[in-house]
Amino acid sequence: MSESTTQTNSVAAALVSEDDVIRVQDLRLNFYTNLGVVRALNGVNFNIPRGKVLGVVGESGCGKSQTGLAIMQLTPSVGRYEAGQILFREFASKEPVDILKLDKNGPDMRKIRGNNISMIFQEPMTSLNPCYTVGAQIEEAILLHQTQDKTESRKRAIDILQKVGMPNPERIADSFPHQLSGGMRQRAMIAMALSCTPTLLIADEPTTALDVTTEAQILDLMRDLQNEIGTSIMFITHNLGVVAQMCDEVVVMYLGRVVERAMIDDLFYDPKHPYTIMLLRSIPRLGVNRDMRLESIKGSVPDPYSQVNGCPFHERCPSAIPGVCDTIMPDEIFVAGSQTHTVRCHLYT
Amino acid sequence: MLNYVLRRVVNMVVLLVVVSFVGFWIIQLPPGSILDVQINRLRQQGGNLPEAQIQALRERYGVDDPFLIKYWKWISRSVQGDFGTSFQTDQSVGERIFNRLGISLGLSLTALLFTWLVSIPIGVYSATHRYSIPDYVITFIQFLGLSIPGFLLALILLIVAAQLWNQPIGGLFSPQYADAPWSWGRFVDFVQHIWIAVVVLAVGATAGLTRVMRANLLDVLNMQYVQTARAKGLKEGIVIWKHAVRNAIHPLVMALGTLLPALVVGEALIAIILSMPTIGPLYLDALRTQDMYLAGTILVMLSALLLIGNLVADLLLAWVDPRVRLE
Amino acid sequence: MATVAEELQRSRKTKKVEDVGSIPQWKLMVRRFRQSRLSVVALGVLLVMYTLMILGDFLAPYPHDTLDSNATFTPPTQLVWGPEGLGVYGLKQELDTEKFQWYYTTDTSVIYPLKFFVPGYEYRLFAIIPMNVHLFGIDTPGDVDQKVFLWGADKEGRDLFSRVMKGAQVSLTLGFVGVLLSVTIGSIVGTASGYFGGAVDNIIQRMIELIRSFPDLPLYMALAAALPLNVPVLVRFFLITIIIALIGWTGLAREVRGKVLAFASADYTNAALAAGASHWYIITKHLIPNAMSHIIVVGMLAIPGAIGLETALSFLGLGILPPAVSWGVLLRDAQTIQAVVSYPWLLLPVACLIIAVLSFNLLGDGVRDAVDPYG
């Protein structure tokens, strides 16, 4: 086990570019519940280069949201980090800090939250507090991190609301969340998240709950703002179409592990891991033979309380090698001839 | 908003009319009246009323009138502020009630304030420290508080206060202060007399509300916006108190509507033990002696209190929660 | 994720790994219930209490209403180990002429043996089998009139233990039956209201609104005061039960109505209708199982309140009336500070009441958590 870990780390280290905002190394997170231990994250490695958009893809329960929450140290209280580091570097010139070493609710962590790293959640309908106006909730973050001046914070809040494409920012600022539509609320959330120009934005399925046209608008907006402000984005989603539209680089997660990571083009044109391949085949495409049935991945994600021997995907994998895949955990290795594309699969060793 | 309030008030008045009708009907159900009780007592003492005088009394009090006429007499006078004359003491009903209602209301409001001041912080603590040892202790004490009859608690506190601290027992004032003008001494004496009642009244309600607060806050803490608030970098205390508690507090506001009259009446039992001149014992006495005008008036007044309490609670709720306000 | 995790933190020690999805629902409920240990203890306590209540006449050595002027305020009898096994010392009643109180001195020279399964007053076990055997009693010579008072005696020299046993038969059943009745009314009316809608619904809703416009305790008091006085105990018992039920049903009826309405518009109802199921089928197969657990929980949580209500009414002299006994009637003896300080055993019925109500509260809470862990 320890041997494989070091090897994995060395691969990860080789991948690391000099100027990363976030480096997640061997992150392990368990939940202790009375039905058993849930191993949510089992050694997650990735990094997000400055100014880039990283997509994190996977089925429900693969640990992608927990990874995002871990970076914010917002993991539920039953969770315990068993190992790993999350290194955050605000500027290229600044020393990186290990977020996991900071006190969960201490002043250093709170200074990072909302200021340097901010987060957007999946449910725009419930992610704003119904008791306060949208403006007040945006100003709250600005007053906390940027300025003490109330008129200044108000001005900035309205500015940012305008920036996210609100037609009448003053009126919106004085509205309560329940008076806005889902798309408007998500814009407000984005405004709140960007109000302190964070170094990293974690977007946890920000468009899943929205309809398709609104989704497209929100994605455009995020892309534009990302270009303008230069914020790095960790984009968590299960929608590969959205990934294609948004991301520079992608990691695919399965059962708390990164199974493949690649630049966006490599992932779509040259997927390696059987899981990734099957994920891609399950998306309908234009121009493909109409008689061909859309493939689905057989089986479902194993029970979270159990521990699977070997590769966690072997039970569902069509190319599983008996005696190998069900006993030995594959390491993360580079795909031959690439410096950016890695995969965790016995087929490529 | 004004529209809403007006509609509520009209609805309330209509309800009160029906309540008074039904309430009075229930109150006059038992056969006989306080007049019989009084005449019997007189006879037992050896006196005897001439039949003519009894008849005069019967007519004066309208004992033999049909129900609808009795009701009409009572309600039409009540509307004019004349609640009739109590059979028992010949005092005006209005005077007897208002004296005591004031004390009852004061006591209950104090108890309600006490309830809020205690149950909110304890409920919050209990919810944020779920399944910790203090949470278990608080939970157990809550159940105990819910399960101990108020009058027993009053009795225990009375014994403790009397035996250990040599405190005065019963009533509202010590004799030397009873008719004295207000002064610091009188105030202290007053507080010494009523604190047991306030605590006892508050204990049951506090236990219940703490539980509700805990459950509600636990729900709210699972809401996404609490996570949003944390993600902004707010201190945990601000996240809890500004973002979570504000959304969990509805039932405590609603409690104003239901708790206030419950407290006003709840002290009936306690007041008997503490021999306090409040509305509860008066109501009980009126029921027992079939003093129907007195009992009917108290019942309707308590209903009015309940309805007004509900209205105030709804308005407060609208103030706390914009979703209610803007509907 | 958060909810599951939060909910389950309490037993970190459990290491069992099994397929949670394959366990039947009721087993999960039992398992969750057993996790709240206080509730399990409460269930045990209640089982014991109800068993004692059923065996009440057998356990009680004397009738609850036998007056004995020679035994006024006798303190609880002390059991001693004598030559013939358990027994009690002789007691002598004396008058304290200064305080005008009876007091008792023990005469340690005599020990009257405690006998088991002794003949006593006639009763019917389980209200059916005629019997006169009682669990215990003391054997005294013909010229000595002494009794064993496990929990002391009251002002009239009546055995408090026997009275508590008798009172339990009222206090532990009245609230229970009242809640059963109110839950039944509430579910039927609520279902009807939600199901038929229109005028029926409107009338029922107005009625509920009216009942809820009365503060409850005063309304209970007024209704109880209107009950006829000269009726047998059993009739009065049922009348009070009915009063409790008549007011208590409104809350549940509203909730059930809400459930029915939600259910009527639920997708699975439409699915069932589309599949050709009748309304009756849907109500019995989908709605009732759906609402049942909720109704049971509401009922469980209402029982302690109903028990307290009976006690309060009886305490106020509006409920069960002497010479019949309930715990509330017994509490009347303990309402003055003098009585409690001089004769603290008069508080024993209060202790029983608190234990019963506390147990019902804890049990109800445990059941609610077990049935509806996130609700």
Image: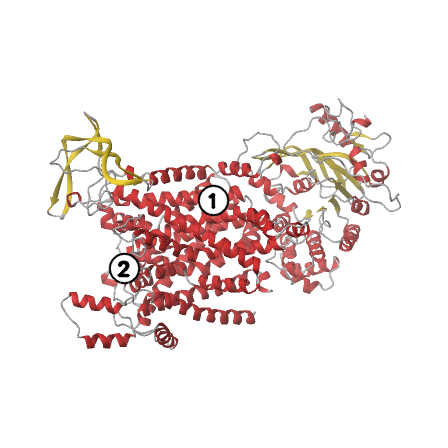
Q: Are marks 2 and 1 on the same chain?
A: no
Indicate whether B73 appears above or below B198. below
Of B262 and A114, nearer the camera is B262
Coordinates of residue A202 in the picture (x, y in percent): 71, 45
Is residue B320 something one can see in this rendering?
yes
Quarter containing the C terminus of chain A: top right
Which residue is tagged 1? C365
Residue A200 sits in quarter: top right
Q: Residues within 10 Å of mark 1 (few under 14, many from 20)?
A: many
Q: Quadrant of the N terminus of chain A?
A: top right
Name the amino acid, label 1. Answer: Asp
User: How far apart are labels 2 and 1 at the CA level?
Assistant: 38 Å
Q: Quadrant of residue A338?
A: top right
Q: Can you tell which mark lies on residue C229? A: none
Q: Residue at x 50, y 70 (%)?
A: B11
**Above or below — where is B63 with respect to B258?**
below
